[in-house]
Image (spheres, rainbow, N blue to C red):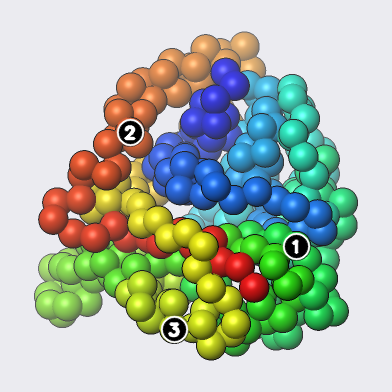
């Protein structure tokens, strides 16, 4: 079980739609390479970058073992912002490379990232503020959080500031079609029909938090140009079909699935997890291969940019 998709499904088995999305992210950014000194800006728990770097977990690993406040899941509480020191991952293969610096605003997620032997340094901070690094600190930078922040233009300017001349940044950014593909937006926000208000439980605040920053390529590229960055590569990914699968997924069932998994006896869990992953993979792997064919006449929902200073 050494492919990135296998590892993603192993980690995110209770949310396989997340594994599908992240597999397509990895494919989109295949031409980006970390060069030291390097920064993972908004690293979260580090699992995505660890798997992309070739790291492997044991079958017993579960990205969702350490969660809290499951009873507040539908109140949009971040149940994953939790750290239990006793829940330590077993690494069956080390990552092929190290990333010099992990940066995130959530201390508990940084504590999770510390367990992966991927990063050399950990910095707690808020990327809505100036980054706590000198000018020209990094040769490479990856970030999947720019669109979560209040002022993307300011963040992109900060990214340009901390990059060395000739340095590269890989950014994942939402396209305007991301809004169009949201069932909550289509059926409730645009219509105001109260019969669709239940979709707020499906959305869980995503429309306000991250979809609001979606932009067409020319708008993102104008921000890059203003910051002194030029585009080395631009790839669009995450078709309408993929986003529709992800939008529903197993998200509404996550709290009860977590409780069901926790109730299984340890000697039963391994077999059930293997069968579960094998089943969902038989559906999701073909979808991952067909992302370019599943656009339904619409541009994909996300941009992957490699930028150079």
For the residues labelled 3 and 1, the Cα–Cα distance comes to 22 Å
Tag 3's secondary structure? Answer: helix
Q: Residue at x 53, y 44 (%)?
A: 30
Q: Quadrant of the N terminus?
A: top right
Q: Are marks 2 and 1 in contact (CB under 8 Å)?
A: no
Tag 1's secondary structure? Answer: strand
Compared to 271, does 195 lie above or below?
Answer: below
Query: Residue 262 shows which numbered tag?
Result: none
Q: Residue at x 52, y 12 (%)?
A: 271
Is residue 83 visible to the viewer in this orientation of the structure?
A: no
Q: Residues within 10 Å of mark 2 (few under 14, many from 20)?
A: few
Q: Earlier in the sequence, mark 3 or mark 2?
A: 3
Q: Nearer the viewer, residue 135 or 44?
A: 135
Q: Is residue 103 left or right of residue 301?
A: right
Residue position marked by numbered label 1 in the rendering: 139
Query: Where in the figure is residue 25, as x and y percent of width and height?
Result: 47, 48
Tag 2's secondary structure? Answer: helix
Residue position marked by numbered label 3 in the rendering: 222
Q: Nearer the viewer, mark 3 or mark 2?
A: 3
Quarter of image, res 215: bottom left
Query: Where in the figure is residue 177, as x and y percent of width and height?
Result: 26, 67
Q: Residues within 10 Å of mark 3 (few under 14, many from 20)?
A: few
Is residue 91 visible to the viewer in this orientation of the structure?
A: yes
Q: Is residue 55 left or right of residue 70?
A: right
Q: Earlier in the sequence, mark 3 or mark 1?
A: 1
Total number of numbered labels? 3
Query: Where in the figure is residue 255, as x and y percent of width and height?
Result: 47, 46
Residue position marked by numbered label 2 in the rendering: 289
């Amino acid at each position: 079980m050494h492919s990135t998709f296998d590892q993603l499904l192993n980690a995110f088995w209770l949310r396989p739609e997340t594994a599908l999305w992240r597999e397509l992210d990895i494919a989109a950014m295949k031409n980006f390479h970390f060069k030291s000194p390097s920064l993972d800006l908004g690293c979260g728990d580090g699992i995505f970058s660890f798997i992309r770097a070739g790291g492997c977990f044991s079958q017993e690993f579960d990205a969702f073992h350490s969660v809290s406040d499951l009873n507040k899941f539908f109140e949009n509480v971040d149940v994953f912002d939790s750290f239990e020191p006793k829940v330590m991952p077993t690494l069956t293969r080390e990552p092929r490379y190290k990333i010099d610096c992990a940066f995130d605003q959530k201390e508990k997620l940084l504590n999770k990232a510390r367990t992966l032997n991927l990063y050399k340094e950990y910095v707690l901070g808020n990327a809505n503020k100036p980054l706590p690094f000198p000018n020209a600190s990094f040769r490479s930078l990856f970030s999947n959080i720019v669109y979560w922040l209040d002022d993307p233009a300011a963040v992109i300017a900060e990214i340009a500031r901390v990059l060395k001349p000739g340095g590269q940044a890989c950014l994942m950014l939402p396209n305007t079609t991301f809004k169009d593909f949201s069932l909550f937006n289509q059926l409730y926000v645009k219509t105001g029909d109260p019969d669709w208000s239940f979709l707020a439980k499906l959305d869980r605040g995503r429309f306000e938090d991250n979809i609001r920053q979606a932009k067409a390529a020319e708008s993102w590229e104008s921000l890059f140009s203003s910051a002194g960055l030029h585009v080395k590569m631009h790839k669009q990914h995450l078709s309408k079909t993929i986003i529709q699968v992800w939008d529903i997924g197993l998200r509404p069932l996550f709290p009860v699935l977590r409780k069901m998994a926790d109730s299984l006896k340890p000697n039963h869990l391994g077999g059930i997890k293997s069968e579960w992953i094998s089943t969902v993979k038989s559906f999701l792997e073909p979808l991952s291969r067909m992302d370019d064919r599943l656009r339904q006449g619409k541009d994909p929902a996300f941009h992957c940019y490699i930028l150079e200073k």
